Image (cartoon, rainbow, N blue to C red):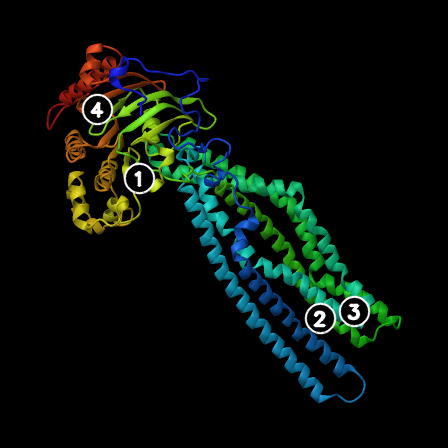
């Protein structure tokens, strides 16, 4: 196989940068050795969509696995609701029996009383069962949603997160998942009951007098007629604006709290408070618009369904029929009792539709996150043949932006250390993040052991590639668990050896419970200590390819030198790619690659590049000058009791 770049095959001082319209050897998204197309996560879906779907499941699809439990909740609730009519019907029958002329049938009276009591007991049992099953179902659904979200967020390109606000994403995983609770545990049964109970009641009332039945329906019809006003496009738009305002204020709170130390240190508290107040004021304005939009309709529905209004309508209608001789006085009683009973389930419709609308919007946002295309997995993973790394005409650009890397050709040989240097914004961090496949190239390919990274399964990739970046995130777990994250079956001795090599063992012993100390709960670590924990993790993983992005930026020079020795000592054939800022790291490298504006402008051994007196030499001199200035400043600083 012909490599993309060999040092002896071209002038090391030159880089092959293809023009934007250039067609690479492999073509966008193609695999040179695998023979089939693999989707790029930032591109439209193609033939590999089965492994990188770009459309999320529908709401029905998300809830379909729980269909039987939903049906059980609804059936139990309906039985309980219908049984709840028994006490009302018993009172009606008792009234009619006691008010009718002639002697009272005691047997009939006790039968009616027992039937009413039995109905009440059935209602309590079945309503409790419905509530219990509904809440258990709600727990399972929320757990399933959060697991799906965690699984998807664990597979999406890291670049996707840089375009999303932390507060809005937290709202999806937290608030939006919780918003499905009423719809699962309460709303289905309540909505069904809102239709079933009135139908059963009306069927009974029609047998008594159909005319007064129609009059009794007037309050419900008025309330139902107002429901569509809550579902208009204007109300939907106000709800969307309300949700967006909630997301913005959540993000502003997170941003304000996380950056409070920097804000105070640089005197920006006033501006930060203004930004938070602006978000809060915008939320209040949006909330007021939402309330003004629904308050009139909600008040109308509550008035129509209120007991005084229902009684007034039934009494006016009943009195009219009684005075005209078309209704017996005793027959007015069931309408007064059941008429009031009709309104309670219908009143739940307003809350039910509101819960449905809120849950529908929440599930829609959950679906949007689940629809984010993950980095695709190969249909037939291929094992690498060795751990030689080749970057072949690699181009990369973030979503909607310019190309950050342009035509990168680079070979990392086993047993060598390659240092990447360059000015800020030259693409160094982006380059090293391509090796652990945080992103896929927009064009070209990256090979490990002759196999394109997109043809390696994730497990195989991370068995071969380990990485430590400047921004270290430790889990809220024990120190030992954090170090053993990539090797969960490692014993304590192996964890301690890795910590010793990373120069963090002594600090760990100072913690309250040593290696069992939970980070973030029992103790906190500085930035440099967190980096050394991450380095210990990488050493324990012992992957043949190691990627370091300013991994010792917070360490003092002596600690950094010890860590560098630890990284190099056992790795006779380890491939190391490191972003270097300190001259010692650059001097120890086998190869130095100089980046500028996303392209390689120089490469070679440090001594050769210095002798060439090009960009790297200028970079070296500027850093030497900066270090000398810092040293002079330290020497000139007053010490002890020296006069200031």
Q: Give how far apart the Cα atoms at labels 2 and 3 are.
A: 14 Å
Which is nearer the N-term, disc 4 or disc 1? 1
Residue under the point 63% across and 72% down: 83
Residue 187 relative to residue 154: left or right: right
Question: What residue did someone put label 1 on?
Answer: 462
- Local packing at callout 4 (Cα closer than 10 Å; few below 14, some 14-19, many 20+) is some
Number of marks present in the image shown: 4
Corner quadrant of residue 450: top left
Q: Going by the image, does 210 lie left or right of 377?
A: right
Front one among 79 and 241: 79
Task: Compute the Cα span from label 3 to label 1.
Answer: 72 Å
Circles 4 and 1 in contact, beta carbons < 8 Å:
no
Write down the quadrant of residue 186 in the picture.
bottom right
Upstream in the sequence, badge 1 or badge 2? 2
Q: Are marks 3 and 1 in contact (CB under 8 Å)?
A: no
Residue 159 or 525: which is nearer the viewer? 159
Q: Is residue 5 above or below residue 259?
A: above
The answer to whether residue 510 is seen in the rendering is no
Q: Which mark's residue is nearer the viewer, 4 or 2?
A: 4
State the residue at coordinates (52%, 55%): 65
| Disc 4 from disc 2: Cα separation | 85 Å
Q: Which residue is mark 2?
A: 337
Say above or below: 288 vs 202: above
Q: Is residue 335 above or below residue 68?
A: below
């Amino acid at each position: 196989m012909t490599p993309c770049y060999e040092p002896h095959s071209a002038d090391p001082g030159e880089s092959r940068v293809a023009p934007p319209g250039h067609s690479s050897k492999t073509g966008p998204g193609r695999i040179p050795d695998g023979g089939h197309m693999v989707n790029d996560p930032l591109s439209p879906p193609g033939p590999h969509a089965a492994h990188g779907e770009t459309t999320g499941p529908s709401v029905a699809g998300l809830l379909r696995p729980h269909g039987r439990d939903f049906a059980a909740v609804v059936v139990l609730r309906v039985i309980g609701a219908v049984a709840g009519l028994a006490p009302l019907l018993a009172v009606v029958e008792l009234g009619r029996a006691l008010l009718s002329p002639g002697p009272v049938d005691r047997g009939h009276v006790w039968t009616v009383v027992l039937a009413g009591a039995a109905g009440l007991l059935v209602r309590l049992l079945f309503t409790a069962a419905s509530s219990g099953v509904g809440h258990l179902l709600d727990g399972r659904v929320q757990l399933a949603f959060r697991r799906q979200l965690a699984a998807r967020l664990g597979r999406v390109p890291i670049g996707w997160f840089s375009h999303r606000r932390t507060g809005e994403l937290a709202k999806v995983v937290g608030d939006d998942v919780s918003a499905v609770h009423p719809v699962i545990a309460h709303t289905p049964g309540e909505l069904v009951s809102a239709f079933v109970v009135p139908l059963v009641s009306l069927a009974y009332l029609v047998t008594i007098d159909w005319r007064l039945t129609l009059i009794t329906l007037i309050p419900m019809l008025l309330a139902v007629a107002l429901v569509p006003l809550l579902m208009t496009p204007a109300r939907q738009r106000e709800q969307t604006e309300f949700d967006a305002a909630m997301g913005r204020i959540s993000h502003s709170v997170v941003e304000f709290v996380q950056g409070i130390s920097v804000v105070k240190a640089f005197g920006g508290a006033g501006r930060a408070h203004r930004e938070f107040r602006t978000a809060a004021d915008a939320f209040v304005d949006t909330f007021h618009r939402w309330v003004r939009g629904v308050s009139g309709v909600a008040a109308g529905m509550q008035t129509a369904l209120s007991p005084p209004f229902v009684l007034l309508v039934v009494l006016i209608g009943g009195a009219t029929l009684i005075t005209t001789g078309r209704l017996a006085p005793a027959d007015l009683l069931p309408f007064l009792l059941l008429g009031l009973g009709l309104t309670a389930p219908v009143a739940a419709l307003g809350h039910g539709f509101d819960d449905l609308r809120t849950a529908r919007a929440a599930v829609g946002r959950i679906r949007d996150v689940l629809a984010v295309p993950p980095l695709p997995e190969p249909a037939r993973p291929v094992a690498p043949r060795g751990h030689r790394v080749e970057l072949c005409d690699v181009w990369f650009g973030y979503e909607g932006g310019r190309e950050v890397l342009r035509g990168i050709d680079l070979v990392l040989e086993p047993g060598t250390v390659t240092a990447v240097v360059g000015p800020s914004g030259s693409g160094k961090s982006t380059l090293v993040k391509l090796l652990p496949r945080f992103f896929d190239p927009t064009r070209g390919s990256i090979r490990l052991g002759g196999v394109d990274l997109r043809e390696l399964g994730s497990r195989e990739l991370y068995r071969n590639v380990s990485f430590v970046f400047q921004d270290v995130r430790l889990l809220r777990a024990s120190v030992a668990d954090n170090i053993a994250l990539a090797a969960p079956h490692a014993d304590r001795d192996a964890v301690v050896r890795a910590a010793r090599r990373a120069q963090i063992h002594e600090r760990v012993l100072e913690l309250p419970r040593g290696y069992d100390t939970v980070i973030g709960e029992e103790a906190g670590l500085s930035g440099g200590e967190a980096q050394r924990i991450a380095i210990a993790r990488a050493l324990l993983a012992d992957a043949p390819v190691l990627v370091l992005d300013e991994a010792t930026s917070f360490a003092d020079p002596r600690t950094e030198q010890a860590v560098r020795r630890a990284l190099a000592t056992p790795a006779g054939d380890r491939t190391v790619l490191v972003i270097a800022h300190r001259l010692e790291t650059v001097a120890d490298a086998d190869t130095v690659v100089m980046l500028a504006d996303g392209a390689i402008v120089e490469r070679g051994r440090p001594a050769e590049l210095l002798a060439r007196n090009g960009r790297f030499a200028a970079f070296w001199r500027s850093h030497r000058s900066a270090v000398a200035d810092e040293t002079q400043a330290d020497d000139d600083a007053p010490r002890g009791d020296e006069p200031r």
